Structure formats: C-alpha cells, structure tokens
Image (cartoon, rainbow, N blue to C red):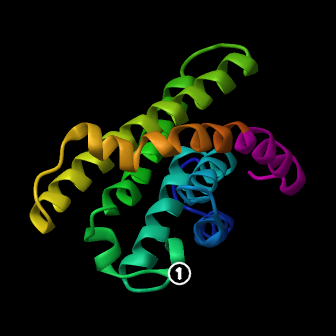
Amino acid sequence: MNGNNKFKTTDLVYIAICAVMLAVCSWISIPTAVPFTMQTFGVFCVLLLLGGKRGTLAIVVFLLLGAIGLPVFAGFSGGMGSILGSTGGYLLGFIFIGLIYWITEALLLRTQGSPASKTAAKISALGVGLAVCYAFGTAWFMTVYAKQTGPIGLGTALGWCVLPFIIPDLVKLAIAVPVSARLSKAIKLQ
C-alpha cells in the first residue's frame, strides 16, 4: 500500500478475490460424523496472503455479501438469518481472527526479529484469534439457543460447536501456512 494509507485498485481487487475465495471455501463441505467446511482454511489463507488490514476487510466484505442475501455461507446459505442465527457468532468471530492478526502484524513491524520468529508470531496470532472466535461464537450460540429452545450448558455447547472442530481447524491452519506462502510467491502480492 502507498504511504498515505489509501487503497490502490490492486488492493481492492485482492480484497474482492479473497472474499470470493472465502465463499468458495464455505461451500466445500467435508462429510464426517460432524461435517465441516473449509471456511476457517479460507480465513487463514486470506490473512496470510493479504495481511491483517486487507485480509480483515476481505472477511468483512464476505460477511456483508452474506448479510445481503448472497449464498456465500456454508450450504449455499445467506441472509441476516444466517448471521443472526445460533451459529452466526462463529461467522462474526472471523472478524476477531482478522483483528488479532492485524494487531500482531502491526506490533511485529515495530520489532526486530528473524523471519522465522515473525512467522511463528503470525501463526500464534491465528491460533489465538481462532480461540477468540470459538469463545465469541459459543457465547452467541448459547444466547440465541436459549431464546429459541431453552437454556443450554457450556459443556454441551462446547461439545456441539467447538470440540469436534478444534483438530480439523488446527489441521487447516497447518495446511494454510505453506499453501499461502507458495501462493504469495506465485502471485507476488504487494
């Protein structure tokens, strides 16, 4: 980006392309006992490719596209019902992953360290962001579920919404790191 923090056309194009990539990743569903999508993989890749600022904006664009009704979420769903529903907090939690990554990236610019230590810090930021996403999404789920059906215990909510996804999400993070590094070299992101 240029020095006065304005977006160039290429920045807007990268943000738009990555918002579409998030939608495509949302549509990819892996059938297991508890089916999961590649949404978090997309979030990790977008942030690693574009950086915190542009990556977070791509996540916001993706969520706004879904909010206006485009079928960009899992199962080709969209609309405010998807966001305001019981699992909508996990979608909104993607913003927290982006913000934590963005802040970490900004702090790393002020420090001197090896590229390996900076990469480790960025991966850790994605892990912390995922944990915050889980926490926010679970609180949201428990609140909405209680209004719709009745109170639910934290253990039950975690068992339904978090525990089955921890290992797959960590695997997706582990795959996103080399994939985004390879893509970054291939497309020469600025």
Residue at 44 percent across and 39 percent down: it is 163
Between residue 146 and residue 33, name the one nearer to us: 33
Relative to 87, is 178 on the left or the right? right
- The secondary structure that most of the magenta stretch takes on is helix
Relative to residue 162, is residue 59 depicted above or below? Answer: below
**Identity of the residue furthest to the top in this view:** 113
Instruction: Name the residue rendered at 53%, 56% in the picture.
Output: 34
Q: Is residue 181 magenta?
A: yes
- Does dot 1 land on a helix, a strand or a loop? helix
Q: Residue at x 11, y 52 (%)?
A: 151
Is residue 119 depicted above or below 112 in this figure?
A: below
The boundaries of the magenta stretch are 175-190
Magenta run includes residue 3: no
The one nearer the camera, 135 or 186, is: 135
Residue count near mark 1 (Cα–Cα under 10 Å), binned few <14, some 14–19, many ≥20:
some
Q: Is any atom of residue 130 visible in this view?
A: yes
Residue 169 location in percent, x, y? 58, 43
Location of residue 101 in the rendering, given as x and y in whole percent from the top left corner = 50, 38
Asked whether 27 or 46 is in front, the reply is 27
> Which residue was labeled with disc 1?
76
Q: Residue at x 37, y 84 (%)?
A: 68
The image position of residue 129, as x and y in percent, is 45, 37
The answer to whether any part of residue 1 appears in the image is no
Residue 82 x/y as whole percent: 35, 74
